[in-house]
Image (cartoon, helix red, strand yellow):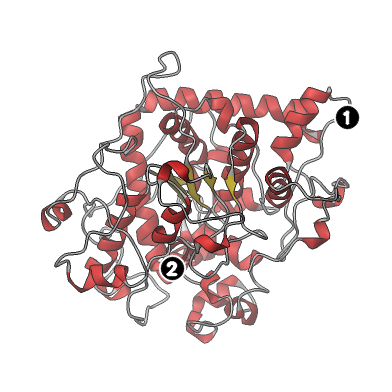
Amino acid sequence: MGPLSSARTMRLWRPGSLGVALGVFMTIGFGLQLLRGPFQKRLPGLQLRQSWVPSLGPTVKSCLPRQRLVFLKTHKSGSSSVLNLLHRYGDQQGLRFALPTHYQFGYPKLFQASKVKGYHPQSSDTKKPFHILCHHMRFNLKEVLQVMPSDSFFFSIVRDPAALARSAFSYYKSASSAFRKAPSLAAFLSNPRAFYSPGGRGNHYARNLLWFDFGLPFPPETRVSPHLPRDPNPLQLHIVPSSGAGPGSLFQPMTTVANSHEQPASFASSDFGPSSFIQWGLAWLDSVFDLVMVAEYFDESLVLLADALCWSLDDVVGFMHNAQAGSKQRLSAVNQSTVKGEDQQLTARARAWNNLDWALYTHFNRSLWARIEQYGQSRLQRAVAELRARREALAKRCLMGGEALDPKYITDGRLRPFQFGSAKVLGYVLQNGLSQKDREECERLATPELQYKDKLDAKQFPPTVSLPLKTSRLLPPY
């Protein structure tokens, strides 16, 4: 991954006799550029992207900062924190954002270039005026390439479906008909078919939300047991959540008894349907995205992101955004070493019900750890420790109490996060007595995504009459 081959100028679908599986992707406008390993032999004529090579370190600048970026903002996966660093970087560098008219690009419909404010069709990459596309959308590569240059850096973030399910149930209970009918997440996962119907209002939040956000087509509906099949050699996922891990924590990658081109060992074929369908989908994502971060290794992912973009650690350091009260405890509960009894059963059922997301997550967990091996674990540990030290110093300097607070303490509407769902969304209060320079920096770090989007919108499209931002205008996320 990393720098794109100069011989390739477009991420476009190269048809040919690829069979029914590839045809499915074509029907919704996907592009296929490059597949690796055994897939390369089946797709003659396609040019491989260059392998990603870690940079030589902060003392040797052998690269230029990347400033054409496409971030697929997945739901309930820590993506709001990534969005904040993109907002700050683009704002300070004077870059232009491809902004939605409101706060999302027509989600849950597939992304359309016409939904970008100020978009005008351009025939040449060099004439495309936008640098960063990063707000909520359902990914649609063909339309994205109408807005962004083909050599943009594509990246996203995924989260363990068990942790995602806990967060989504709390946040989207009123938005999903399936969640709304269920008295609890445990009740829902014990018999999801009693509550869930495909195509029901908001039910994309209730099953395989990551797969949906990536814009992938779904295999034919198959009846899935809410229980994981018993496996004599089950997949073991060792997670050290970044939020609770110290600088000296051991980094343990996920291991599996299956190789990267086979169905994960924890799933029976009946759970996925044809395994080739899943593998084609994952291979296609590999060909499009330069990096997929993992929420459970958030700080490690940030270090790799900074390296891939030739940015400094200061460019990616920041605070967590859109976190729900109690989210740290829920994240820690996903760690297999601490999950007990009913929580362990709920975790297993959540991963089985969201079987496509589990396949996607384990795939990108593997690719992240392959990248970490290339980068060097000792080097990564040092960088992560430095990143956390800088974040802690910023929190002490900027924030009242040095951490996120209950929204009842946040009286400044510019910093109060939008409240949606049953759990409170935490935010920040700035310290008193800050200098003007420090206050401006701290405010950028603490500004929630919707207010920052409004700020960028006003900067790019100045209103004819100056009006104060009205948080009452904020719309629910569906």
Question: Which sits in the foreground, 351 or 219?
Answer: 219
Label 1 Cα crowd, 10 Å radius (few <14 / some 14-19 / many 20+) = few
Name the quarter where the N terminus is drawn: top left
Q: In this picture, is 36 found above or below 206?
A: above
SS assignment at label 1: loop
Q: Position of residue 42 (x, y in %)?
A: 12, 58
SS assignment at label 2: loop
Residue 432, which numbered label?
1
Q: Nearer the viewer, mark 1 or mark 2?
A: 1
Q: Position of residue 352 (x, y in %)?
A: 40, 69
Label 2 Cα crowd, 10 Å radius (few <14 / some 14-19 / many 20+) = many
Asked if residue 191 shows in the view, the reply is no
Residue 354, which numbered label?
2
Mark sitting earlier along the chain (1/2): 2
Residue shown at 65%/36% (left/top)?
A: 91
Residue shown at 50%/66% (left/top)?
A: 346
Exactly how many numbered labels are in the figure? Answer: 2
Residue 171, which numbered label?
none
